Image (cartoon, rainbow, N blue to C red):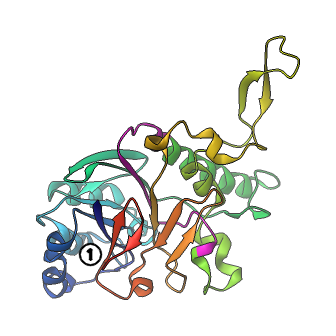
């Protein structure tokens, strides 16, 4: 059993650390790891970053974070990440880390992610240059998450993003905002699907050799080679008015841990069952 505490979208401002620190010091009593799903600050300023550092640095359990769109607001995200890292917080962006717990090794792959929408209503790399750039960025960040997950061969794999990988956890948000709150490409990366348009080598139907064919019709879980390669839980924030519980198209458990959604300083999930216990 592994216990994951998680929260996102705290949007801290001046004075937040002194007020909230006692709440997060309790995380070590109920969880093995604390994961932060972005938008730790309201404006991404250095002063706000210092509040986040003082809030989460030096807690008595591993703390792993991704940044959110608000944390990028001032263009100081690199300095922000350095401040958190200096305080002992692991900041992921297209990277992964492994934590040893009493319940086994936990691998966390993280990326901020990006908008783009969901299957049938998603941005595509067609039309004006601005739309092409938007779609390319969505694809690039999803590929970074896919690559980070592929590096992990552990007992439990967790995907940590700010943007949502499924529309399930957006229910409650205005439909018009869905394209700005997440991307189906993140869900595909979590499910182990190859990038759109990828090909794979298979035996041809006549048994005369192998051939390349475009991937897209296979069941996504058929592409995941073994349980240690599957994602146990995907965590995100960003959708303040969304729903906590959802799944990806292939059935991976997804939890929206935006603070207004979970209604607590953090939620605690027991893995591998992905049930909330606190």
Instruction: Please state which of residues 241 and 169 is positioned toward the viewer in this rendering.
Output: 169
The residue positioned 16% from the left and 55% from the top of the image is 86
The residue positioned 59% from the left and 72% from the top of the image is 181
Q: Which residue is mark 1?
A: 48
The answer to whether residue 149 is magenta is yes
- In the rendered image, residue 99, in percent from the top left (x then y), is placed at 24, 49
How many numbered tags mark residues here?
A: 1
Drawn side of residue 77 relative to residue 89, left or right? right
Name above or below for residue 66 compared with residue 155: below
Name above or below for residue 22 compared with residue 2: below
- In the rendered image, residue 197, in percent from the top left (x then y), is placed at 75, 38
Drawn side of residue 278 relative to residue 200, left or right? left
Quadrant assignment, res 174: bottom right
Q: Residue furthest top?
A: 208
The answer to whether residue 148 is magenta is yes
Quadrant assignment, res 39: bottom left
For label 1, the crowd category at 10 Å Cα-Cα, with few meaning under 14, some 14 to 19 and many 20 or more, is many
Query: Can residue 130 be spotted in the picture?
Result: yes
Q: Which residues are magenta?
A: 147-168
Instruction: Please state which of residues 255 and 115 is positioned toward the viewer in this rendering.
Output: 255
Query: Can residue 193 be spotted in the picture?
Result: no
* Quadrant including the N terminus: bottom left
Q: Secondary structure at mark 1?
A: helix
- In the rendered image, residue 107, in percent from the top left (x then y), is placed at 34, 48
């Amino acid at each position: 059993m592994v216990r994951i505490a998680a929260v996102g979208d705290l949007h801290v401002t001046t004075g937040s650390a002194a007020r909230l620190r006692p709440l997060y010091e309790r995380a070590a009593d109920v969880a093995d790891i604390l994961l932060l799903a972005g938008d730790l600050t309201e404006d991404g300023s250095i002063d706000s970053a210092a509040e986040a550092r003082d809030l989460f640095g030096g807690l008595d359990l591993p703390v792993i974070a991704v940044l959110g769109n608000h944390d990028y607001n001032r263009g100081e995200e690199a300095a922000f990440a350095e401040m958190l890292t200096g305080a002992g917080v692991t900041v992921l962006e297209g990277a992964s880390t492994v934590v040893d717990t009493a319940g086994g090794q936990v691998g966390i792959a993280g990326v901020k992610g990006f908008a783009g929408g969901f299957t049938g209503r998603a941005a595509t790399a067609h039309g004006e240059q601005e739309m092409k750039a938007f779609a390319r960025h969505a694809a690039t960040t999803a590929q970074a998450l896919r690559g980070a997950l592929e590096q992990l061969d552990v007992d439990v794999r967790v995907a940590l993003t700010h943007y949502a990988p499924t529309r399930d956890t957006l229910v409650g948000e205005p439909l018009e905002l869905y394209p700005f709150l997440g991307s189906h490409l993140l869900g595909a990366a979590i499910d182990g699907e190859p990038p759109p348009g990828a090909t794979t080598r298979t035996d041809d139907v006549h048994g005369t050799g192998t051939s390349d064919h475009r991937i897209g019709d296979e069941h996504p879980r058929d592409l995941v080679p073994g349980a240690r390669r599957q994602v146990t839980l995907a965590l995100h924030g960003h959708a303040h008015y969304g729903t906590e519980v959802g799944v990806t198209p292939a059935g991976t458990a997804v939890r929206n841990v935006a603070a207004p959604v979970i209604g607590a300083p953090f939620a605690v999930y027991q893995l591998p069952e992905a049930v909330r216990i606190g």
